[in-house]
Amino acid sequence: MFKAIVSADTLGDALDSVSVLVDECKIRLEEEGLTIRAVDPANVGMVDLTLDAAAFESYETDGGVIGVNLSRLEEFVGMADAGQLVQLELDEETRKLHIQIEGLEGTLALIDPDSIRQEPDLPDLDLPANVVVEGADIARAVKAADMVSDHIALGVDADEELFYVDAEGDTDDVHLELTREDLIDLTAGDARSLFSLDYLQDMNKAIPSDAEVTMELGEEFPVKLHFDIAEGNGQVTYMLAPRIQSD
Amino acid sequence: MFKAIVSADTLGDALDSVSVLVDECKIRLEEEGLTIRAVDPANVGMVDLTLDAAAFESYETDGGVIGVNLSRLEEFVGMADAGQLVQLELDEETRKLHIQIEGLEGTLALIDPDSIRQEPDLPDLDLPANVVVEGADIARAVKAADMVSDHIALGVDADEELFYVDAEGDTDDVHLELTREDLIDLTAGDARSLFSLDYLQDMNKAIPSDAEVTMELGEEFPVKLHFDIAEGNGQVTYMLAPRIQSD
Amino acid sequence: MFKAIVSADTLGDALDSVSVLVDECKIRLEEEGLTIRAVDPANVGMVDLTLDAAAFESYETDGGVIGVNLSRLEEFVGMADAGQLVQLELDEETRKLHIQIEGLEGTLALIDPDSIRQEPDLPDLDLPANVVVEGADIARAVKAADMVSDHIALGVDADEELFYVDAEGDTDDVHLELTREDLIDLTAGDARSLFSLDYLQDMNKAIPSDAEVTMELGEEFPVKLHFDIAEGNGQVTYMLAPRIQSD
């Protein structure tokens, strides 16, 4: 059993944070809320989303797992105007999801969860550096790096107490530094890892420009990005595997 | 003889309502105003437009028929800024249309009306159901149906006193209901017909979202849509032939 | 040595006026400011830009010539928000340009100036007619001509004291007249020349709609267009060669 009412904006933001990485996913229906964990086909980018019951106008379930085509579901949710509510109800028999938005009713066929890629474990890494930045700063870094390269290095200089971004192309390069004053918070520790820019660009699409994004960084380690959605009633964690340094 | 001055917005709206169905049309120049009737090449969608002399700043003609390439004429009219006036004058000798917009003069070659597809008769159907909706509701129904199917069913449930829209795809479907309270007006009578979504999407492009649209509906019958343009000094009627129910 | 600080908007406008014609150019660094002269590969359109030292927040150079890829440099400048400053510094040893924008540092490889097409001489023509129009009028003329033709005739009727634009297509044509009252200034003299519309469209992209554009015109002669940028601290001159009259 699953029956819930949620604002279209909240549900849309939550789904967007997953659909930047995968087309289909399992949604775990738990008493405390929804959770989605997914990894892209290349095993490079992972997402872990929780949308707490408190993010919903109403939320009832006795548990279960459903498989969804994210773009289809997002299209349905996109039929709502800003501020409109979306009512979701699982039909256990037909394995379809009923969706209602202000007089509009839709039925969305679900996908057999067993046919969807297995959910990843997001390892608990003890990373030495911790940086809290505005989403807009990540957007700027990604845009700058994209001018010159397909890769982006994220690092922390523990001595100088700064977070930096490096991108080196064949002839041109860019470098961005955010000092302790430019950052919302910084736990300094030496860190530098190289990442595929494509993935960070995709993740960036789902990060609100005014979000506080916590980045955990290490030396040649994955980066973890955490931010809240749904006014704090939802959490997104991205993990991105590093690339081997090319030099 | 034909000589007229009209606001670019009014003329543009009138032409748009025809150009969503056909590329070329005959314009009948009558004392009371312009009329255009046209049917798309597949004989599925028809339009009947009248633009009364009162919609013009000035309007003079002794009758006649001219053939125009709609996109060319729309391009000329599109040169005007919002609120600017367009002056039209037929040169009988050269069979060209002179167009003037604030210092800009253009000459548009007309098309031999005999080379243009014959004008259709829009049959006078006595349809049992009559629904008056806002243009925005048609837009929403069309958008929702497009998520799941190429067809759209429009119907009226006489007992429940409601207008409904159904679209059924291979796996997903949508259903929209507007009760008497959601509608501007309703003359209930059982009706349900299936239509090609493409045509309704095209017609919808010419329907202002705040227009009052009167829909006449029957059982497996064409639908007629009427709405005003030019602040009531122009009328558009669309007629769309039904598809055979696929089930 | 070259070191300068300039608003991103000013630098962007200056570069745009050149990049509509060529991909690469030489920038002459002079004590009084920057100058760029370039001609398109077909030798039809030329640009002469000066950006005075007064257009910069700070400007220091001991002279020299650098070669740049305009789209790369424009991308870097485009990283700045409106109103932000761009700091430029030439690294003589590496022949790279260092660019700084609010914490973002970039390095742009320069191009060997000898590998760039030679700078043209913009001949000093003594043209009989001189017209000063708003940029918006040029935009309108170009848009209107584009509806019917690939060519555009610009002319002055000395007797009537008016500037006119003609475009003739196979079946349709447009004609635009601006009288002395519609113009900012007019020095009448008979003039009429035919131009390729493509070039004028490209030049028009760099002309602000509220710019005062001085046009020098003759009979079957090139047209020269002059306008200011950087609040009068920069000047752009375009010269466009005429086409042989097709009739």
Image (cartoon, coloured by chain):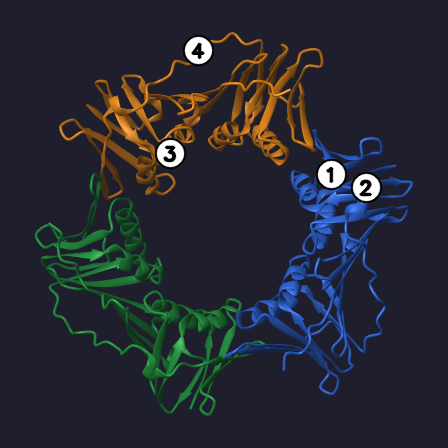
Chain colours: A green, B blue, C orange
Q: Going by the picture, which residue comes out furthest to the top?
A: C126
Q: Residue furthest front?
A: B115
Residue type for callout 4: Pro
Q: Dot 4 falls on which chain?
A: C
Is the Cβ of the residue at disc 1 closer than 8 Å to that at disc 2? yes
* Numbered tag placed on residue C12 in the rendering: 3
Q: How many marks?
A: 4
Q: Are marks 3 and 4 on the same chain?
A: yes
Residue B96: % across, % down: 78, 34
The reply to whether the C-beta atoms of the residues labelled 3 and 2 are less than 8 Å apart is no
Give the letter of the chain under mark 2. B
Chain identifier of the residue bearing label 3 in the image: C
Q: CA distance from mark 3 to mark 4?
A: 27 Å
Q: Residue at x 13, y 63 (%)?
A: A221
Determine crowd level at label 4: few under 14, some 14-19, many 20+ residues with C-alpha closer than 10 A: few
Say what secondary structure mark 2 lies in.
loop
Instruction: Identify residue for label 4.
Output: C123
The amino acid type, in three-letter code, at marker 2 is: Glu
Residue A31 sits above or below residue C215 on the image: below
- Amino acid type at circle 1 is Leu
Which residue in the structure is indicated by mark 1? B85
Q: Which residue is mark 2?
A: B57
Circle 3: is it few (<14), some (14-19), or many (20+) Cα within 10 Å?
Answer: some
Comparing labels 4 and 1, the label whose residue is closer to the camera: 4
Is residue A10 something that shows in the picture? no
Question: In percent of the image, x 12 and y 60: which residue is there?
Answer: A220
Please, what secondary structure does the residue beneath circle 4 have? loop
Instruction: Tell me the distance, in whole angstroms, between the alpha carbons under discs 3 and 2.
Output: 45 Å
Give left or right: position of C165 versus B18.
Answer: left
Quick check: marks 3 and 1 in contact, CB under 8 Å?
no
Q: How far, Cα to Cα, is label 1 from label 2?
A: 9 Å
